[in-house]
Amino acid sequence: MNTLKAGDAKDVEDAVRAAVAGDQPLEIIGHGSKRSIGHAMTTNAVLDVSALNAVTCYEPHELIVTVQAGAPLDEVVSLLDSRNQAFAFEPMDTAALLGVRSGRGTIGGMIGAGLAGPRRIKAGGVRDHLLGAHAVSGFGGFKAGGRVVKNVTGYDLCKLLAGSWGTLAVMTEVTLKVMPKAETERTLVLNGLDDVTANRAMTAALGSPYDVSGAAHMPHAALTAARGALAVLASTGQAATLLRLEGIAASVAHRGAALAAHLAPFGAGEFVEDAVSAALWRDVRDVAPFAADGPLGVWPVWRIVCPPASGGAFGQALARETGGEVIYDWAGGLLWAALPPSVDVVDAHAASLRRRLAPLGGHAILLRAGEELRRTVDVFHPQAKGVAALAERVRQSFDPGSILNRGRLTRTPIS
């Protein structure tokens, strides 16, 4: 496969212009850590933007960072950490789940995938923190947004890039909002709740005035498949429901005691503090129980979004009917399901899963699967006719020739 290595933004624009002129589709990569997500692309050329890896502006007092799209995410996170700051949306590290070497994720990949962590319920997602972008579409280079929130006028085009999986434009530089890290954190752990009861407990916690920043539930079977911090919780022999509080120490202590009292009808909880708490939530963020090198590593993994109030009942029924394992984030609004392969069910339960999701208005992405399965199943949730038509008009307004990552989102590439 022909690989074009871009050294700067002009190289990216020249490569895209040449591809458009020659009707030659391009696969866009940084370090390729998420190449196995989505359908096989219809291309024999790769545009590598990993050399665009500089932090071009970091203003800690203004809470913004401007960075090139190929910059390694780990290095940017480390830079922010040195100033006691972070991305509030907790970008997910998919390395363990997908079975690739850690540290290969890039800022561009983070935005293109749009996968946020447990704090999504409080802080919003990637798109909510993207202030501006320089990018190259099928029409050439453009700039959207800026370096402050009030820069945005008219259509906020840069938001469309989040979760677009590289199908609209090639990002070269982006500006993101950052936030101070919390002084301390603690997690209330409730043991022994079934999925539906845990769903009710998480809903009660989020509906309380105690500013919960994470709400997750781990059935015991999932805990036994985990390693690290979550694996320690398996020693109780019970499921664990996790509720996180963050802020200054005095506030966290006060809110923690009040939250425990508020949730007393669900049982007595135990607190874990700071470093242990942070490790637990990293494991939740990165779906540690379903890691590729773990006992469930050969099972396809679905990322399912549904109304939080429906999550417990839906996940419990799904696990029972498929023999799979389910874990819950976002208070039941985000489910991760590892479903066992079967000779009788060759579509990884896609048809039945999506049929059951339809009445709830949810959607599901087959985030981890082998190439053969991804050729026979819609990886991304099929859109309603009207939504699909709108999405296609948006795509054509950026890339009318379908040059960028052609075929990644659909099994029938647009010609």
Image: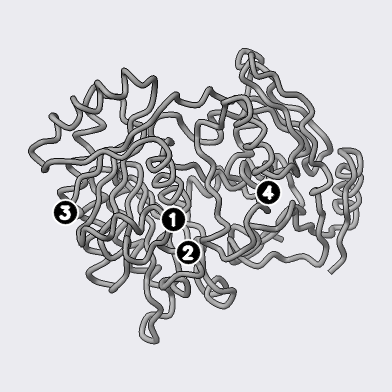
Q: Earlier in the sequence, mark 3 or mark 4?
A: 4
- Which image quadrant for residue 65? top right
Tell me the crowding category of disc 3: few under 14, some 14 to 19, or many 20 or more residues within 10 angstroms, Cα based.
some
Q: Position of residue 369 (x, y in %)?
A: 52, 70
* Frontmost residue, 381 versus 263: 263
The disc label shown at residue 166, or none: 4
- Which image quadrant for residue 149? top right
| Image vertical order of residue 338 relative to residue 271, above or below | below
Q: Position of residue 346 (x, y in %)?
A: 43, 80
Q: Earlier in the sequence, mark 3 or mark 1?
A: 3
Front disc: 3 or 1: 3
Q: Which residue is mark 2?
A: 291
* Frontmost residue, 52 versus 210: 210
For the point 73% across and 55% down, which residue is it? 31
Question: Could you tell me which secondary element the residue under label 3 belongs to?
Answer: loop
The disc label shown at residue 192, or none: 3
The disc label shown at residue 98, or none: none
Question: What is the CA distance from the residue labelled 1 to the residue labelled 2?
Answer: 7 Å
Q: Which residue is mark 1?
A: 287
| Image vertical order of residue 246 relative to residue 391, above or below | above
